[in-house]
Image (cartoon, grey):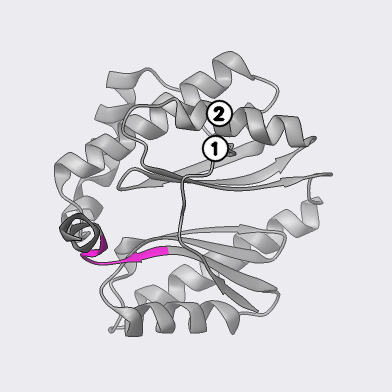
Amino acid sequence: MIRLRMIVPLALISAGSLAMSGCAATVAFLGVKAGTTIAQDRTIGTAIDDATINTDYNTRLARERSDLYRHVNVKVVEGRILLTGHVATDADRTSAGRIAWAIPGVRAVANELAVGQSKTVGSAVNDVWISNQLRGKLMTDGNIAWVNYNISTVDGTVYLLGVAKNESELERVTLHARTIPGVKKVVSYVELKGAEQRRASL
């Protein structure tokens, strides 16, 4: 099954990854991601803003809810946050979301944190395999600007975050995802290129 979603400002979200000091994280991000950023349909300024949001979130989560820090994964594209992983309770999920919405520059949050027992080692390995398989498919498809897509897989569900050139490209991406063995469903938080400008002109 494929579910296509738009990220809407819902005040429930959660996330986490690696905590670093703001400036240090931004510098590290630029050092590792410079080449990719140039290829993406993002400006250097936007990429820096996203890196700052990512760092800010991880730092706050580690400080306020260190018990959640290792269980939440966060990805940021153009001020949109995607949170995936497992937390123990609904309250944990809400708490992580509250932290995300408190960060300057965040314009949308997608809370895909699962409440309940964490996945098994076997499931985690399979999720990594699925994500790598999809990245490989996107990289070898000449009709897809693969650098514009972020991929997270949790318990066989593939989550996509990024910017698509057009609807046809997004359809190709989701088709690649759902043909990978072990994929249960695909959830897309991908925006079409220029969507922000179109909304602003309304």
Mark 2 near mark 1, Cβ–Cβ under 8 Å? yes
Find residue 151 and report its horizontal and vertical position in percent: 49, 60
x 56%, y 14%: residue:
63
Query: The residue under label 1 is which amino acid type?
Result: Ala
Q: Is residue 43 above or below residue 50?
A: below
Task: Name the element at disc 1.
Answer: loop
Magenta-highlighted residues = 190-195
Q: Is residue 192 magenta?
A: yes
Q: Is residue 56 above or below residue 135?
A: above
The Cα–Cα distance between marks 2 and 1, rounded to whole angstroms, is 6 Å
Query: The residue under label 2 is which amino acid type?
Result: Arg
Q: Which mark is residue 11?
A: 1
x 53%, y 44%: residue:
10
Q: Nearer the viewer, residue 171 or 125?
A: 171
x 28%, y 83%: residue:
142
Q: Nearer the viewer, residue 195 or 171?
A: 195
Q: Residues within 10 Å of mark 2 (few under 14, many from 20)?
A: some
Q: Is residue 111 magenta?
A: no
Find residue 145 and report its horizontal and vertical position in percent: 28, 72
Residue corresponding to mark 2:
98
Q: Residues within 10 Å of mark 1 (few under 14, many from 20)?
A: some
Residue at the outermost front position: 202
Q: Is residue 111 above or below residue 161?
A: above
Q: Earlier in the sequence, mark 2 or mark 1?
A: 1
x 59%, y 80%: residue:
178
Find residue 197 and report its horizontal and vertical position in percent: 18, 59
Res 40 → quadrant: bottom left
Identify the image quadrant of the N terminus: bottom right
Q: Is residue 39 left or right of residue 96?
A: left
Q: Which mark is residue 74?
A: none
